Image: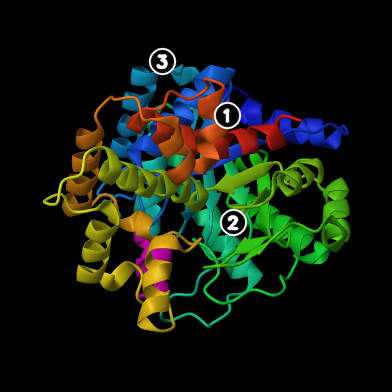
Amino acid sequence: MTGATTRFAGIAARRAAGGKGGIVSICSAHPLVIEATLRHGATHGADVLIEATCNQVNHEGGYTGMTPAAFRSFVETHAVRTGFPLDRLILGGDHLGPNPWKHLPAAEAMKKASVMIDAYASAGFTKLHLDTSMACTDDPVALADDTIAARAADLAAVAEAAVVRAGGEKPVYIIGTEVPVPGGALEALDHMHVTEPANALRTVEVHRRAFSRLGLDAAFARAVGVVVQPGVEFGNADIIAYAPQMATKLVASLESMPQFVFEAHSTDYQPAEALGMLVRDGFAILKVGPWLTFALREALYGLSHIADELTPDPSRESLPAAMERVMLASPGNWQKYYSGTPDEQRLQRHFSFSDRIRYYWPSPDAQHAAEALLAALGDRKIPRPLVSQYIGHLDAEVGVGRIRPTARELLIGSVMRVLDIYRGATNP
């Protein structure tokens, strides 16, 4: 085994031997998040795992407009610019399955999912999360475990053939049927269901059988992670932190599957201590996405206020005002997720933990507004009192000289601050 296979097998082996440690999975396509991630990895000499989701990147372009090959080129271009070694870069595909086409009959949706995973595997993505848990239009509301596993194995067969054809590295697989809602919960949170140990064990067994029926035993030997719900989640204004006592039995079930670690989705906004306990307990792959763009938005809005102080210009639209205009003009990415009065919806559009504003940063108007803001501030040194007032979470870092107080470096620093928390958790 080489490359990603060795790295992930090593994580599982260390866990089985009683060791600790893990890896953070960066789920974002924002250029500044990607740059911050790669710079952070280069600084620490660490592997970097960046994942694209099925809705974000697929053979039809996804909402970013990028195919898997284009996304790989996009990330590698940033890696070269930041001096990050390509041999330490791992690319993953998340929720790979029929989800973007679940409005179609299952056969048609799975045909599109097959083309998508072929594109991912052919482009050299070496960590593939097989997620076929969603029902299509002619499916029952809740799919049987055997159906989910059979569809996942069908996609794995396509990926394996694509790698043979393209001559790339064999991928590792993530399986799991208890997949949290991408982007956070839609309702207020007061409790969280934890995956039953029997369900985790059954997930592994039904997938093992499904792979074996297709002659994919060697591929299943490269399955390294099971997606489960450890009892963590975030909503628009709520965060449920990891409570180890609630997951004791689930954690114990790992002893019966030494090939695997758990992959935890929706770990955004968890306290540092909670993230550390997750890794300690075997949730060795921590997924994060909205928290990174939330941190970026915090800094961007802070810079907008700073620009009003340093370079007042009545003709320049503030960034929050520009984003409000953009989101109101195209409500599809927030309207069905944010409820309440008009004022409550306005607050959620800008400040919700689910951070659905992230879908709007690629729009031309949003890009123009952000570029105008950065142009107004240029490379000037921002006075520390203004950093303290408007981007206070970075004041201490600026004070000791770890972050240069220019607009761009403050944006990068805001994202790196979150990455530092994950590094502390995954490298105890």
Q: Earlier in the sequence, mark 1 or mark 2?
A: 1
Residue at label 2?
A: 266
The extreme left residue here reads 315
The answer to whether any part of residue 98 appears in the image is no
Q: Which mark is residue 4?
A: 1
User: Can residue 69 be found in the magenta stretch?
Assistant: no
Image quadrant in which you'd find residue 244: bottom right
Residue at 22 percent across and 39 percent down: it is: 311
If you read the primary sequence from the N terminus, does the residue marked by circle 3 or circle 2 appear first? 3
Asked if the residue under mark 2 is in contact with the one under mark 3, i.e. CB atoms within 8 Å, the reply is no
Q: In terms of sequence position, does the residue under pointer 3 or pointer 1 come before the other?
A: 1
Q: Using the rendered view, name the quadrant where residue 80 is placed.
A: top left
Query: Which three-letter amino acid code belongs to the residue tagged 1?
Result: Ala
* Residue 1 x %, y %: 63, 24
Circle 1 or circle 2, nearest the eye: 2
* Residue kind at label 3, given as amino acid type: Gly
Q: Tell me which residue sits at (51%, 42%) in the image.
A: 392
Percent from the top left, x then y, of residue 162?
Answer: 41, 39
Dot in front, 3 or 1: 3
- In the image, is residue 181 above or below residue 276? below
Q: Which residues are magenta?
A: 98-112
Residue 283: x percent and y percent?
Answer: 73, 46
Residue 83 is tagged as: 3
Asked if 91 appears above or below 297 in the picture, the reply is above
Q: In 3D space, how far apart are the residues under numbered discs 1 and 2 (Cα atoms)?
A: 23 Å
Label 1 sits on a secondary structure element that is helix
